[in-house]
């Protein structure tokens, strides 16, 4: 056991103390997998404010999330419902229309704790007949280790839990080349301080190139959803969109009704009108 535990402990220590230029290429090369963990199945009593509980119940029922409510941990369940509500609010306000069969990519989903709610949304939003959904998660740092010595990729597989048509890819978003109808960008890194804090090398911060690439993947009529942290990020994100000649269809400071905390999250929706090659 020590033959693999000691090297992994050293790699985790490099991560923990921020030796970015060493540990990122090492973990990316090793691509450690310990195995799919078991979800904790924690009780959800008292998780939401009394005022927010009816909305949480509605989301679970409307999107068929009873099994996820049973299997998930409290934190993952709470945040995944908030992400679901954010998607619902944004797509509704922006007047988005989705095809009966769609492909989607989620760029930078970390360990994808919210994949079941994102998939349920794409499958069931505003349709009586559930859509056929193909959903890819593309994570640059998929091999980052957690305290249990499992990687993000291990946990992503647990969160996916056998969802049909859903795949987690440990790869650079710029290398993903499948045309899609929907692209999700939850809190993409835009500034070097955040990028470095999360343990990524300087050369891999390429927000302009990544945005341009994701836009090129979108089919005509495709939907780009972006969530940003704070007004400074939102303003920079909108400037990048303008540089590409893209018009924001809808954007707002997101307010959720579910829990007590109030993050400063800004949500933006862009709809691709015709072929876009910028």
Image (tube, grey):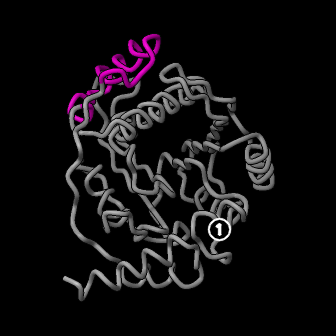
Spot the residue most to the bottom.
3
Q: Is residue 234 left or right of residue 222?
A: right
Residue 249 versus residue 112 in the image, above or below: above
Q: Nearer the viewer, residue 138 or 69?
A: 69
Q: Quadrant of the N terminus?
A: bottom left
* Highlighted magenta segment, given as a residue range: 45-69
Residue 231 versus residue 189 in the image, above or below: above
Q: Tell me the residue at 70%/58% (across/down).
A: 190
Residue 57 versus residue 160 in the image, above or below: above
Q: Tell me the residue at 31%/36% (across/down).
A: 131
Residue 84, percent from left and from top: 44, 32
Q: Tell me the residue at 45%/61% (across/down).
A: 138
Residue 243, percent from left and from top: 80, 55
Label 1: few (<14), some (14–19) or many (≥20) C-alpha neighbours in 10 Å: some
Q: Nearer the viewer, residue 268 or 128?
A: 268
Which residue is labeled 1 in the image? 196
Q: Nearer the viewer, residue 18 or 184?
A: 18
Q: Is residue 60 magenta?
A: yes
């Amino acid at each position: 056991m020590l033959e693999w535990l000691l090297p992994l402990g050293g790699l985790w220590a490099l991560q923990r103390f921020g030796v970015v230029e060493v540990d990122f290429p090492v973990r990316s090369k090793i691509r450690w997998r310990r195995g799919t963990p078991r979800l904790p199945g924690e009780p959800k009593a008292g998780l939401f404010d009394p005022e927010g509980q009816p909305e949480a119940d509605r989301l679970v029922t409307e999107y068929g999330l009873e099994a996820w409510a049973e299997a998930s941990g409290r934190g993952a369940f709470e945040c995944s419902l908030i992400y679901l509500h954010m998607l619902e609010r944004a797509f509704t306000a922006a007047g988005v229309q989705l095809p009966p069969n769609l492909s989607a990519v989620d760029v930078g989903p970390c360990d994808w704790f919210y994949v079941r709610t994102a998939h349920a949304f794409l499958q069931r939003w505003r349709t009586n007949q559930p859509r056929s959904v193909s959903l890819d998660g593309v994570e640059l740092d998929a091999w980052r280790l957690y305290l249990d010595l499992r990687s993000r990729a291990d946990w992503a597989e647990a969160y996916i839990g056998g969802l049909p048509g859903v795949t987690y890819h440990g790869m650079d978003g710029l290398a993903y080349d499948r045309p899609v109808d929907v692209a999700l960008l939850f809190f993409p890194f835009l500034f070097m301080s955040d990028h470095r804090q999360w343990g990524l090398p300087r050369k891999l911060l390429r927000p302009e190139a990544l945005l341009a690439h994701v836009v090129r993947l979108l089919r005509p009529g495709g939907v780009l959803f972006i969530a940003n942290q704070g007004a400074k990020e939102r303003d920079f994100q909108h400037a990048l969109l303008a540089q590409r000649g893209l018009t924001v269809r809808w954007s707002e400071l997101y307010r959720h009704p579910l829990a007590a905390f109030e993050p400063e999250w800004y949500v933006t929706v862009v709809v691709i009108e015709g072929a876009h090659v910028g």
